[in-house]
């Protein structure tokens, strides 16, 4: 037996609950929900003897909003705005495309999560055709469309070393913004050779060459330039996505790809056939690799993925929101440490005068409340999580009773805050109209809302 979550407001249709009663929870909300399979008898809905939901996540009653990417129907209340298609990693570990204005449920972290990113441009004009003249070829040959690519098409190219002695590599140059972080990423798969070297160079750079060696058979890195920022992501069918990042000190960057028979063996005698497979080259002005942007020439607009705004408004919002008190819990993973992303904002239209929000600045996770244009709450909750780390934050509000916490830490409390008025929207991981520095560039694993205040965060 479970309750429907439709247009009626369950907290209005039930007997009044004495909110002054605090149930003695054994652990905080952010710790309790970190394992949603836990069963706590004292957290059962008091109006039901038994609740057959997948997890007992209520404290007094079931939430009125539960955005769970493992159950895509729960995301239908979200209005997504994003110009153009965008890619994501699907449940089978393949690269898939999402149509414009669509929520992306991504599995690159190993579990389903909402993917939210700022805009980005792929500066590589032909990301899947390495035979183009824009790629300089030194003692290598390209066989186009020679293998099944990560998107399921036969569009992966083979990079083979010619039957000569020396270095064997593919190179492409691009004009970039001086002084900005740039990330080069590419999908690789072993062929006759297991090893691939990815190199990022810039004329006049303080550290002019960054290099990573990767074993596409074992999924492990070999020799890596000291201090270089790099990642790998495992996909289906033996594919990996590699990335390498450096900050430019000129307006030119060169990217090189080497097929190798052993770790860091750049120079050797090739046999004319042995090599590795490549697909999906991407260079972007970013401190991390964002979702793949396929290119086939065209202007900058054709090579750009638009930013995303995810909003719940109208009847979808009013069906779950309680103006007098409520609690929101969000699980998030940041991809980058260089931005100041909002995790969730509950606000009046698109303005800043009346709003409640959780956001990350350069150092901390923060809770803010603005009422009639005045900042009434500003609380640093704890250290900003590292990029790639799953973090859990909770925020609870009632008149003169604001509480917030992150990752089960101490609860920050404000007992003199008037609540904002006219609230009519919830923004997920962004704030419409603000610069992209405030967009998440990461994932939302779960977002839950209860229409009542909680002291146990």
Image (cartoon, grey):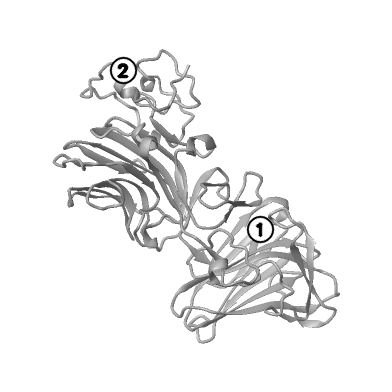
Label 1: element kind: strand
Label 1: how many Cα within 10 Å (few below 14, some 14–19, many 20+): many
Residue 114 versus residue 85 in the image, above or below? above
In the rendered view, does 358 fall on the left or right side of 148?
A: left
Whole-angstrom CA distance, mark 2 to mark 1, is 53 Å
Which dot marks residue 240? 1
Q: Nearer the viewer, residue 88 or 223?
A: 88
Q: How many circles with numbers are drawn on the protein?
A: 2
In the rendered view, does 144 fall on the left or right side of 178?
A: right
Compare marks 2 and 1 and give the one earlier in the sequence.
2
Residue 125 on image: x %, y %: 62, 72
CB contact under 8 Å: marks 2 and 1 = no
Label 2: element kind: loop
Looking at the image, which residue sits at the far bottom?
204
In the rendered view, does 433 fall on the left or right side of 140?
A: left
Where is residue 11, by image quadrant?
top left
Where is residue 293, by image quadrant?
bottom right
Residue 12 on image: x %, y %: 29, 22
In the picture of the structure, the residue carrying the numbered disc 2 is 14
Visible in this render: residue 414? Answer: yes
Question: What residue sits 50% from the left and 65% below the top?
Answer: 120
Residue 142 on image: x %, y %: 78, 72
Visible in this render: residue 227? Answer: no
Q: Nearer the viewer, residue 278 or 370?
A: 370
Mark 2 against mark 1, which lies toward the viewer? 2
Question: What residue sits 57% from the left and 56% below the top?
Answer: 85
Residue 429 versus residue 128 in the image, above or below? above
Q: Quadrant of the C terminus?
A: top left
Residue 341 on image: x %, y %: 37, 56
Label 2: how many Cα within 10 Å (few below 14, some 14–19, many 20+): few
Residue 207 versus residue 229 in the image, above or below? below
Q: Nearer the viewer, residue 413 or 171?
A: 171
């Amino acid at each position: 037996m479970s309750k429907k979550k439709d247009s009626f407001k369950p907290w209005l249709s039930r007997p009044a609950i004495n909110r002054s009663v605090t149930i003695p929870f054994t652990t905080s909300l952010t710790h309790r929900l970190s394992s949603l399979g836990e069963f706590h008898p004292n957290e059962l809905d008091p109006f039901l003897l038994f609740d057959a939901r997948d997890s007992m996540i209520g404290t007094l009653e079931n939430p009125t909003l539960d955005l769970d990417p493992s159950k895509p129907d729960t995301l239908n209340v979200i209005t997504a705005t994003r110009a153009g298609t965008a890619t994501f990693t699907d449940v089978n570990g393949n690269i898939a495309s999402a149509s414009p204005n669509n929520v992306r449920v991504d599995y690159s972290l190993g579990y389903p999560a909402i993917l939210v990113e700022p805009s980005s441009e792929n500066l590589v004009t032909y990301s899947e055709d390495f035979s183009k003249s824009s790629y300089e070829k030194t003692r290598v040959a390209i066989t186009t469309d020679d293998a099944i690519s990560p998107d399921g098409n036969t569009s992966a190219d083979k990079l083979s070393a010619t039957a000569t002695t020396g270095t064997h590599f593919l190179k492409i140059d691009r004009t970039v913004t001086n002084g900005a972080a740039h990330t080069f990423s590419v999908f690789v798969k072993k062929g006759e050779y297991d090893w691939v070297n990815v190199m990022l160079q810039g004329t006049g750079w303080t550290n002019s060459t960054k290099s990573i060696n990767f074993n596409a058979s074992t999924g492990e890195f070999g020799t890596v330039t000291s201090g270089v920022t790099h990642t790998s992501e495992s996909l289906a069918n033996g594919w990996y996505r590699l990335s390498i990042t450096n900050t430019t000190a000129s307006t030119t960057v060169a990217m090189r790809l080497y097929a190798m028979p052993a770790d860091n063996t750049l120079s050797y005698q090739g046999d004319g056939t042995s090599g590795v497979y490549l697909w999906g080259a991407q260079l972007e002005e970013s401190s991390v690799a964002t979702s793949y942007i396929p290119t086939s020439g065209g202007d900058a607009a054709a090579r750009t993925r638009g930013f995303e705004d995810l909003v719940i408004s109208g009847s979808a919002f009013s069906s779950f929101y309680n103006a007098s008190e409520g609690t929101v819990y969000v699980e998030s993973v940041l991809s980058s440490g260089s931005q100041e992303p909002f995790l969730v904002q509950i606000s009046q239209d698109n303005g800043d005068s009346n709003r409640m929000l959780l956001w990350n600045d350069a150092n901390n996770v923060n809770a803010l409340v603005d009422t009639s244009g005045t900042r009434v709450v500003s609380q640093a909750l704890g250290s900003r999580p590292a990029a790639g780390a799953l973090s859990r934050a909770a925020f609870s509000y009632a008149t003169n009773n604001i509480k917030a916490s992150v990752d089960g830490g101490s609860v920050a409390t404000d007992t003199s805050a008037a609540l904002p008025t006219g609230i009519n929207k919830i923004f997920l991981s962004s704030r419409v109209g603000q610069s992209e520095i405030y967009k998440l560039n990461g994932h939302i694993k779960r977002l839950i809302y209860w229409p009542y205040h909680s002291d146990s965060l």
